[in-house]
């Protein structure tokens, strides 16, 4: 949903996620935004109006009929979706789920020590672990 990302960025926010999902038979356009000062209700309203206007102009096969637009903050347990996210949050605790066993586990919770384009390095209570991004099925920051 490249167009939505561009709109959010032009408004001065970071587009963390822009996706189209179907839940209980309902089409939902979900947009998560962030900024250095945090996100408030007025920020969500600004983005919602701009994205809604853009979507209305592009009523194509993906969004024909009724859909719901959700705009919100990624929250304290922000999802980590891009390799750059891991570098940005180096030193923070994260939960990383994998599709296959790595060091005997599919869920790894630890401090992000480093990352590159191919993998993230976590320091967990069980020791250091190297996780290839190709094997990551989901990841988020951990709030304690």
Image (spheres, grey):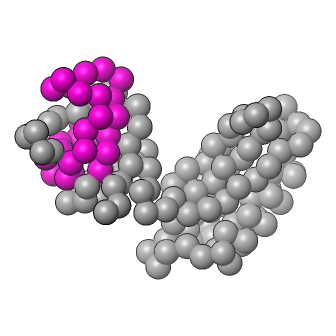
Q: Residue at x 56, y 63 (%)?
A: 73
Regarding residue 102, the answer to whether it shows in the image is yes
Work out whether 106 lies above or below 138: above
Residue 140: image location, x then y, percent: 38, 49
The dominant secondary structure in magenta is strand
Regarding residue 116, the answer to whether it shows in the image is no
Is 111 situated left or right of 6 in this image?
left
Does 122 appear in magenta?
A: yes
Residue 57: image location, x then y, percent: 87, 51
Residue 1: image location, x then y, percent: 65, 44
Which residue is at the far top? Answer: 100
Which residue is at the far left? Answer: 127
Q: Residue at x 41, y 31 (%)?
A: 137
Q: How many marks?
A: 0
Is 119 situated left or right of 28 in this image?
left
Does 14 appear in magenta?
A: no
Work out whether 89 lies above or below 66: below
Quadrant where the C terminus lies? bottom left
- Report which quarter residue 93 is drawn in: bottom left
Q: Residue at x 87, y 52 (%)?
A: 56
Q: Residue at x 72, y 36 (%)?
A: 23
Work out whether 45 lies above or below 124: below
Query: What are the residue bounds of the magenta stretch?
Result: 94-123
Residue 51: image location, x then y, percent: 74, 59
Which residue is at the far right? Answer: 65
């Amino acid at each position: 949903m490249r167009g939505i990302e561009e709109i959010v960025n032009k408004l001065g926010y970071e587009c963390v996620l822009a996706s189209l999902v179907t839940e209980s038979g309902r089409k939902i356009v979900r947009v998560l935004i962030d900024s250095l000062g945090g996100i408030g209700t007025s920020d969500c309203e600004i983005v919602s109006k701009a994205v809604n206007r853009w979507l209305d102009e592009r009523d194509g096969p993906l969004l024909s009929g009724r859909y719901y637009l959700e705009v919100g903050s990624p929250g304290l347990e922000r999802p980590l979706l891009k390799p750059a996210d891991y570098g940005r949050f180096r030193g923070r605790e994260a939960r990383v789920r994998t599709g296959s066993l790595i060091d005997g586990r599919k869920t790894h919770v630890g401090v992000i020590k480093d990352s590159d384009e191919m993998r993230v390095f976590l320091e967990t209570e069980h020791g250091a672990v190297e996780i290839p991004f190709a094997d990551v099925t989901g990841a988020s920051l951990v709030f304690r």
